[in-house]
Amino acid sequence: MVDRISTETAYGNALVRYGENREVVVLDADLACCNHTDLFKEKYPERFFNIGIAESNMVGIAAGIATTGKIVFAHSFAMFVAGRAFEQIRNSVAYPGLNVKIVGTHAGFSVEKDGATHQCLEDIGIMRTIPNMKIIYPADAIETEEAVKAMLIEQGPAYLRLERIPLNLINNRPDYRFKIGQGSIIANGNDLTILTNGLMIPAVLEVYEKLLKDNIKARIINMHTVKPIDKNIIIRSAQETGAVITVENHNIIGGLGSAVAEVLSENCAVPFKRIGVNDCFGKSGKFADLIKKYNLTAKEIIDQIKGVLAKKKR
């Protein structure tokens, strides 16, 4: 496996690999080349269906196919599958608990120049409100493949969030294990806890290295599953480090920060800060420029962390 690959590309490869399971059916909303489902189409054309630019219809068809016992993956950009097809996902998939996997690609700022209309910064929040819905947001190619494998085994609906920015591998270690609903510690420390996921992990690992120069050792947790959230790792880390930060490529309302805040407020109140997009729309631009504009670079994250650590000392 190459060192740098997008989770979308890794997903396309995983679909082909696990597509040997003849129960797998793939639907796409006329974006197969962008979503990399064209790889599955080429190898298993009899189980691939392009529904066209009709996401709501696609989810309804996925639900119907799932009633026959198939495992159905339904794809579009996160903005359109999570936003446009919400009613069908809620009523036709989640309510009856069907085995449909909703896949939202080009999530958050990873869609770059397509701008605010396509930069879905709300999809996790939307999906979190739906009962029975699991939400998985992998950090690299290895985790993406493991997530697909786990979703095939796990019955019921799930939402997989993917991005098109190439990412370095962070989970290429022999002890790595993926389990839905279980966070993963990728760097240990006792001065504060930083929970993150997806393409913000490289920036957070840079933060970790910079904080070490100030004798601050952070505990970094990859929260690849936003729902069900790993309450145990959040509570334990909050108790052991005394301060918690979340960093996400998503609106701070409804996303990872909100999920963690709910756990802390009910179980372990400590100094806490949500770092992400502050209740606004995106802009057209390169990823590096966008995270700078929205205060998500390592330097700006550190500035906010130091404010939280100051509260911890009081």
Image (spheres, rainbow, N blue to C red):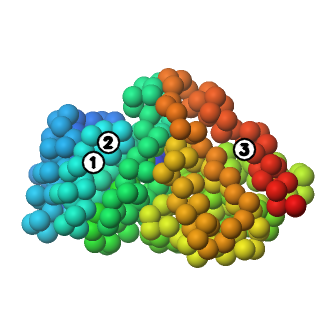
Apparent side of residue 6 relative to residue 149 in the rendered image (left or right): right
Residue at image mark 3: 301
Could one spot residue 239 in this view of the protein? yes
Judge the density around disc 1: few (<14), some (14-19), many (≥20) Cα neighbours within 10 Å: some
Q: Alpha-carbon distance for marks 2 and 3?
A: 29 Å
Helix, strand or loop at disc 1? helix
Above or below, comparing residue 309 to residue 123 in the picture: below
Judge by depth and name the residue closer to the eye, 280 or 60.
Answer: 280
Q: Which one is closest to the eye, mark 1 or mark 3?
A: 1
Q: Alpha-carbon distance for marks 2 and 1?
A: 6 Å
Above or below, comparing residue 282 to residue 71 in the picture: above
Residue at the spot 67% in from the left edge and 75% down from the top edge: 236
* Amino acid type, mark 3: Ile
Kindly indicate the quadrant of the structure image that contains residue 9. top left
Residue at the spot 32% in from the left edge and 64% down from the top edge: 131
The percent position of residue 187, horizontal first and vertical second, equals 71, 63
* Amino acid type, mark 2: Gly
Residue at image mark 2: 83
**Which dot marks residue 86?**
1
Helix, strand or loop at disc 2? helix
In the rendered structure, which disc, 1 or 3, sits on the residue that comes first in sequence? 1
Q: Alpha-carbon distance for marks 1 and 3?
A: 33 Å
Judge the density around disc 2: few (<14), some (14-19), many (≥20) Cα neighbours within 10 Å: some
In the rendered structure, which disc, 2 or 3, sits on the residue that comes first in sequence? 2
The percent position of residue 269, horizontal first and vertical second, equals 68, 67
Kindly indicate the quadrant of the structure image that contains residue 302. top right
Could one spot residue 50 in this view of the protein? no
* Amino acid type, mark 1: Phe
Judge by depth and name the residue closer to the eye, 131 or 137.
Answer: 131
